[in-house]
Amino acid sequence: MEPIKKDLVIRGQQIYLRPITADDTELAVRWRNKPAVVKNFIYRKPVSRKDHEKWLTNKVFKGLVHQFIICRSEDAMPLGSVYLQNFEDEHKRAESGIYLGEEQAYGKGIGTEAVKLIADYAFGTLGLHKLSARVLAYNTASRRLHEKAGYVQEAHLKDELFLEGKYEDLILFGAVNPRDH
């Protein structure tokens, strides 16, 4: 996959998505280390500035990950991040992910809108056929937002992950490009 065009902006109703840059490092590191964000990630180790810079250099800037910052339309305030990773060119699929780093974004449909926008980008601009998302079963907010964004639960994997001393269930969601049907 090619890297995201630096000037790409994906506009929605209450938010827009812009490509993540090195200038977002401090913000992304702060968000990724917030307990409310960490508890919903499979990867739970603290993220350092160096870790994030390595992620940008080795993944984002090479086009292996398409990561965007979610910004509020009214004042450009960054609220979180949405991304596509694990591209499979042969099968025209990728995995989507999202996190909201600012509590004021919770419960306002911002996550749902961001997931819809990234899906439109994946299906329309990138021409992908399918998106998948992994959600910890106890994360009801993420489960709801994926369903509202058009994803369908495809599997419920019991005791799939060992996190913080106990086994957790994992839900696999999928969305198929509506243009392909």
Image (cartoon, grey):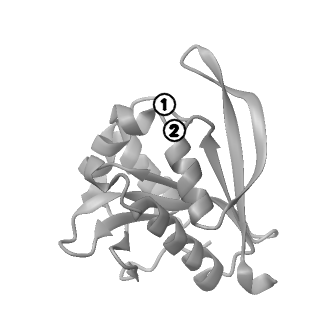
Residue 148 image-quadrant placement:
bottom right
Counting other residues with Cα less than 10 Å from the Cα at mark 1, is it few (<14), some (14-19), or many (20 or more)?
some
The quarter in which the C terminus is drawn is bottom right
Quadrant placement of the N terminus: bottom right
Residue shown at 28% from the left, 42% from the top: 30
What amino acid type should be assigned to the residue bearing mark 2? Phe
Q: Nearer the viewer, residue 127 or 141?
A: 141
Q: Which residue is drawn at 53% across and 35% down?
A: 43
Give the residue furthest to the left: 75
| Residue 179 percent location from the top left of the image | 73, 86
- Dot 1 and dot 2 residues touching (CB under 8 Å): yes
Mark yes or no: residue 20 visible: no
Tell me the amino acid under the disc marked 1.
Arg
- Give SS at disc 1: loop
Q: Position of residue 39 (x, y in %)?
A: 46, 32
Look at the numbered disc 2 and give the secondary structure of its residue: loop
Image mark for residue 44: 1
Judged left or right of residue 126, residue 92 is right
Q: Which residue is at a point 33% across and 74% down the rendered structure image?
A: 14
Q: Quadrant of residue 109?
A: bottom left
Q: In this view, does 56 lie to the left or right of 94?
A: left
Residue projecting furthest to the top? 165
Residue where numbered disc 2 is placed? 41
Query: Above or below — where is 147 with respect to 125?
Result: above
* Quarter residue 131 falls in: bottom right
Question: Residue 114 placed where, x, y %?
Answer: 45, 67
Residue 22 drawn at (x, y percent): 30, 59
Rendered view: 30 above or below 116: above
Q: How crowded is mark 2: few (under 14 residues within 10 Å), some or many (20 or more)?
A: some
Tell me: residue 105, above or below residue 131: above
- In the picture, measured across the screen, residue 107 lies left or right of residue 97, that is left
Is residue 173 visible in the rendered image? The answer is yes
